[in-house]
Amino acid sequence: MMPPHHPGPQGPEAARPAPTLPEAGLSRTGLERARLLRGLALVPVAVFLLAILAPPLNHDVAAILTFSERWLSGERLYQDLIDVNPPLIFVLNLVPAAIAAATPLDGPGAFLLSMLGLCVLVWRMTVALRRDRTEGPVENATLTAAIPLLMLLPGYDFGQREHLMALFALPYGFLAARRIEGLPAGRRLSAGVAVLAAIGFALKPHFLAVPALVELLVLVRRGPAEALRDPVPWIMATVWAIYLATIPLFFHDYFSHVLPLVWSYYADLGVYGFWSVLGSPLLGPMVPVVLALLGGAFLLRRAGALAQVLSLAALGAFLSAWVQHKGWTYHVAPILALGGATAVALGARLADHSLPTASRSSAAPAIALAATLALAAFTLRGGEAPWREIAFAETQGARLTAWLRQEALGERLLVLSPDIYPVYPALNYARAQTTLRTMTLWLLQGVYRDCPAGGERYRQTWEMSRTEFFVYRTVAEDFARAPPAAVLVARHSGIPICEGQPFDFVTYFSRHPLFAESWLRYRPSGEIDGYRLYVREN
């Protein structure tokens, strides 16, 4: 019986150079030079790795990790722990939370260990998916040097949901290119990549723009018959269907309670609108970058399937950031990672076709070095790493961390603040847990976007909406039922001043008799950078 025939690439794909190792045909001196350049190409990887391992952990990452730790300790997600994120990110963070609970590692250390393990897994998948691809010397050397850097490029945003999506999208992009080129990848590898990608794209509904665009390209390039027989999209769809089914089954409060809060109070929090975000300092420059990458990938004859797939993934990441219209650094992170991957794949492939055959191998290591330096320089000019890590010891976050370690190490705290940073990761480094049901008092910011009628600073209980009364009541009741060791209060409320009166959290909650009675047991312990700490007297 004849083995099944896998059709080879057609058109531009057939014109690709034969697989060649970057060092093929080099002299001994050339080999030594190539090894030196390959080592230098990894220097940016080392810089970003050191930045990631150094404090501070990203504030949003730290806050989500704290919620997963509290969930693991017995609190109920979306009942005792209220947050806008769908449950998947909290489920994933149960892994580092469990590691921290079972080992001497603290939460941030366990999280970084888990994330670096994921990076190794993704790297091994990409190596396997490249193993029998037809790559020229420049493409081979450049992808080998760039892929580890692309996984670390988010820097301070390492571990954010957007970073996880981009991380899992990398092997998915290589698999999609193989599917277009007609190259089999093996059932186990294909299934593993598809499951991992489905998890990454399920972290936020906006992320589904990435597989939608990529699968559309696969459909167009392979034809409906071949594309529909491909198990990869069906595996991803099955993972999404199972996930969607589990939310009402295990997290029914997310749809009934949390989503209405998101639409009412969270979606409009931010500086930019849907159109104005395109002029923001971070997302705005990505518009011409993404357009240029798309043009190069689809208009240049020798661009190749990989560049086309990655350019559409970058476009999907851009659309996801645009829809959220926040303009924050972590929204841009996947555009940088996937756009950087596109630029590397496109530029290296064009170099292999443009350079004389005899000079490709000798030029490959230098081009790989230039590519990693260019990626690092482009990221460093607008990114937060390693500048935030280098300056951390002198920041508000470091001072708050040291203070909490001294005053409330391992304790339970009620945190009355509108800000994620610097509360997180200071709480994580102090191994302290907040007792607030939300990560911050963002719900109060939402209900007090406008000043109350009649010149009053605070609404009376009969004037409150259900959302405000829920916050007012639960903070007071939780505080009285299990008084924490300390209370951390921000002077800055993030709420507009009305009639010359600032919004004070302690004054607001002290109107509740349970809070007022319990508050009598606390004495001031000091203030640092606009945060006041009150310690419970035994």
Image (spheres, helix red, strand yellow):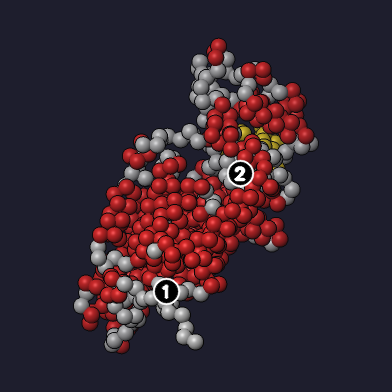
Q: Is residue 13 above or below residue 288?
A: below
> Could you say whether the residue bearing mark 2 is in a helix, strand or loop?
helix
Tell me the number on the disc at residue 42: none
Mark 1 or mark 2: whose residue is earlier in sequence: 1
Q: Nearer the viewer, residue 180 or 520?
A: 180
Mark 1 near mark 2, Cβ–Cβ under 8 Å? no
Categorize mark 2 by other alpha carbons within 10 Å: few (<14), some (14-19), many (20+).
some
The C terminus lies in quadrant: top right
Q: Is residue 412 left or right of residue 181?
A: right
Tell me the number on the disc at residue 403: 2
Residue type, numbered disc 1: Leu
Disc 1 from disc 2: Cα separation: 57 Å
Q: Is residue 30 left or right of residue 104?
A: left
Categorize mark 1 by other alpha carbons within 10 Å: few (<14), some (14-19), many (20+).
some
Q: Is residue 481 above or below residue 289?
A: above
**Picture quadrant where residue 80 is located:** top right
Q: Nearer the viewer, residue 273 or 487?
A: 273
Seen at 51% across and 22% down, the residue is 450
Q: Nearer the viewer, residue 523 or 218?
A: 218
Q: Position of residue 247 (x, y in %)?
A: 64, 47
Residue 135 visible in this rendered orientation of the protein = yes
Residue topped by disc 1: 183
> Could you say whether the residue bearing mark 1 is in a helix, strand or loop?
loop
Q: Is residue 511 left or right of residue 220?
A: right
Q: Nearer the viewer, mark 1 or mark 2?
A: 1
Q: Position of residue 412 (x, y in %)?
A: 70, 43
Residue type, numbered disc 2: Trp
Q: How many discs mark residues in the rendered view?
A: 2
